[in-house]
């Protein structure tokens, strides 16, 4: 699956457009990781536990979006975007969305 943030792909022609596809995932923080993050917050620096958590949830959202696109017959997604929302204290949603298309070499 080709995924791009642009509206078109170099050296590819969009043959068919299938419309909006999306994938989302929601993750909650882990109490044990929150304690470590709070300690890091005192001294500053990257909170790697949260970086890893958000990376995992982004990948899950991308995978779900790609699955939906494949189900429609697409081999690419253009105009990819991400959105995130805090759903509740300690829980966040990542939404990946774009336009499913079928492309071929020009």
Image: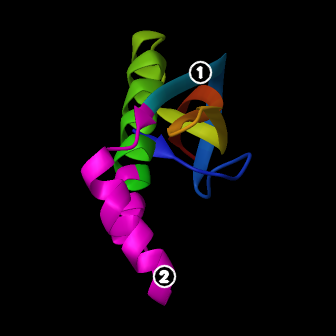
Q: Position of residue 58 (x, y in %)?
A: 45, 45
Q: Secondary structure at mark 2?
A: helix
Is residue 65 placed above or below 85 in the rendered structure? above
Q: Is residue 41 found inside the magenta-colored segment of the image?
A: yes
Quarter-of-image position of residue 82: top right
Q: In the image shown, does 16 or 96 lie closer to the viewer?
A: 96
Q: Position of residue 32 (x, y in %)?
A: 25, 52
User: Can the viewer see residue 1 in this picture?
Assistant: yes
- Numbered mark located on residue 21 in the image: 1
Q: Is residue 6 found inside the magenta-colored segment of the image?
A: no
Magenta residues: mostly which secondary structure?
Answer: helix
The magenta region covers 27-53
Q: Secondary structure at mark 1?
A: strand
User: What residue is pinned by disc 2?
Assistant: 42
Mark 1: give few (<14), some (14-19) or many (20+) Cα within 10 Å: many
With 16 as the anchor, is 57 left or right in this view?
left
């Amino acid at each position: 699956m080709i995924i791009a943030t642009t509206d078109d792909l170099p050296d590819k022609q969009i043959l068919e457009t299938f419309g909006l596809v999306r994938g989302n995932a929601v993750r909650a923080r882990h109490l044990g990781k929150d304690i470590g993050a709070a300690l890091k917050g005192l001294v500053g620096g990257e909170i790697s536990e949260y970086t890893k958590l958000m990376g995992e949830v982004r990948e899950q959202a991308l995978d779900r979006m790609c699955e939906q696109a494949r189900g429609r017959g697409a081999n690419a997604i253009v105009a990819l975007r991400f959105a995130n929302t805090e759903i509740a204290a300690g829980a966040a949603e990542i939404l990946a969305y774009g336009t499913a298309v079928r492309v071929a070499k020009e």
